[in-house]
């Protein structure tokens, strides 16, 4: 789904601008599947990106330039993605019309589904399927405020990059999931991308999105709780959150605080699941996959398994991606994998399969 730019496949670098870091992934198609060409992460200072809005564009642009220079990435075409309150995703039903007439109908009627002035948004849609009678189609309608897209494209232009596509974080995660796991079309999975400030939830059956929601909770809440409860610096709280030791802090203290925040996340996930089940009769979630920088919070996945009584696994965006071990070590790929799921999904936009 392209909210900005053309739909034709074009070689792009997947560029994920998050609250804590900029991440880039470049892929190449091979006979066996996909190969990792380039990967880079550049941390961002706090308050550089807040609630999905780029506050300090020069800092973001400088981080992008560093990645491209350090990784010797020559391709200037990028696909990026957005999430948050400026993004509206709705399922709607329209008459089954020829493509050009359907386009006109969607753009003519979208205003009743979008809580923003229609002139202020970029719109796109995807046909999900026909009604049982065949006279209607079910669409996934996506609208993003133009100012949100401009916020991102301006920072990328400042870095000398050409934005050929703007996607949505939840759908980028779905791209990575589909390519790596080739899901059974009858199986329903919840894809969670837990970043620093936002958690994207996308419930999919096979390759069809059923329900999406963005929640304003994430890794920053763990850091804040550790800082406040244990009177730590930001740096020490971040280290603890990543599983490292900090002098004077016991494992029991740390895990207790982390668990209290994990329970808040689990409550938001449960609310989302409850709402989904209420609106999608007969649907059952079979599996939960977790990506994002907070996927490895100590104890989080174990707690979710207990809470939801479902298989819960870390989503591996490189499960079916090969790489040159002389260029990328197994340890490095394993270390960065959860944080790169969106960037991998965006990198896949170079190819016709997504």
Image: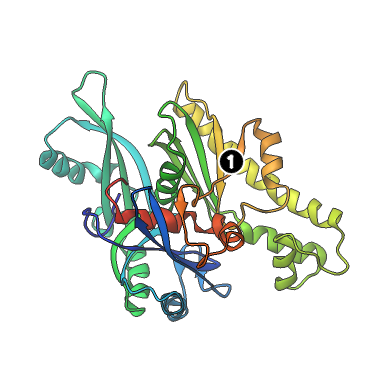
Q: Nearer the viewer, residue 142 or 343?
A: 343
Q: Which residue is mark 1?
A: 269
* Lateral position of residue 168 relative to residue 300, left or right: left
Q: How is the image coloured?
A: rainbow
| Numbered label tally | 1
Q: Nearer the viewer, residue 24 or 71?
A: 71
Residue 18 percent location from the top left of the image: 49, 64
Residue found at the very far top of the displayed protein: 133
* Lateral position of residue 196 relative to residue 72, left or right: right
Q: Nearer the viewer, residue 72 or 63?
A: 72
Residue 294 percent location from the top left of the image: 62, 55
Residue at 87% across, 59% down: 250
Query: Taking the image as drawn, is residue 49 in sight?
Result: yes
* Lateral position of residue 283 relative to residue 27, left or right: right
The quadrant in which residue 238 appears is: bottom right
Mark 1 surroundings within 10 Å by alpha-carbon count, few (fewer than 14), some (14 through 19), many (20 or more): many
Residue 104 percent location from the top left of the image: 14, 44
The quadrant in which residue 96 appears is: top left
User: Vertically, is 328 above or below 174?
Assistant: below
Residue at 24% across, 55% down: 9
Residue at 60% across, 41% down: 313
Query: Taking the image as drawn, is residue 83 in sight?
Result: no
Residue 193 percent location from the top left of the image: 53, 50
Q: Secondary structure at mark 1?
A: helix
* Lateral position of residue 332 relative to residue 115, left or right: right
């Amino acid at each position: 789904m392209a909210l900005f730019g053309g739909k034709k496949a074009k070689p792009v670098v997947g560029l994920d601008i998050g609250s804590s870091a900029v991440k880039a992934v470049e892929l190449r198609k091979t006979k066996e599947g996909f190969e990792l060409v380039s990967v880079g992460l550049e941390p961002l200072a706090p308050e550089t990106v807040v609630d999905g809005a780029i506050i300090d564009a020069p800092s973001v642009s400088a981080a992008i330039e560093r990645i491209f220079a350090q990784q010797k990435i020559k391709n200037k075409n990028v696909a990026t993605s957005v999430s948050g309150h400026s993004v509206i995703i709705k399922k709607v039903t329209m008459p089954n019309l020829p493509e050009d007439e359907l386009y006109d109908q969607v753009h003519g009627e979208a205003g009743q589904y979008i809580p923003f002035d229609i002139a202020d948004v970029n719109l796109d849609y995807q046909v999900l399927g026909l009604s049982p009678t065949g006279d209607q189609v079910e669409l996934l309608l996506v609208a993003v405020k133009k100012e949100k897209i401009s916020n991102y494209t301006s920072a990328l232009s400042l870095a000398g990059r050409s934005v050929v596509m703007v996607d949505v974080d939840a759908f980028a995660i779905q791209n990575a999931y589909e390519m790596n796991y080739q899901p059974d079309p009858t199986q329903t999975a919840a894809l969670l991308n837990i970043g620093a400030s936002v958690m994207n939830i996308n419930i999919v059956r096979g390759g069809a999105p059923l329900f999406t929601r963005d929640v304003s909770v994430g890794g920053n809440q763990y850091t804040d709780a550790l800082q406040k409860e244990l009177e730590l610096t930001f740096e020490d709280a971040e280290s603890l959150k990543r599983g490292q030791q900090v002098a004077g802090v016991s494992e029991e203290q740390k895990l207790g605080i982390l668990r209290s925040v994990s329970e808040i996340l689990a409550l938001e996930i449960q609310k989302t699941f409850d709402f989904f089940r209420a609106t999608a009769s007969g649907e059952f979630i079979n599996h939960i996959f977790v990506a994002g920088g907070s996927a490895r919070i100590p104890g989080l996945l174990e707690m979710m398994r207990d809470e939801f009584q479902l298989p819960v696994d870390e989503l591996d965006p490189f499960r079916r991606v090969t790489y040159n071990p002389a260029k990328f070590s197994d340890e490095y790929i394993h270390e960065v994998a959860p944080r790169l799921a969106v960037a991998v999904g965006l990198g896949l936009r170079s190819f016709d399969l997504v």
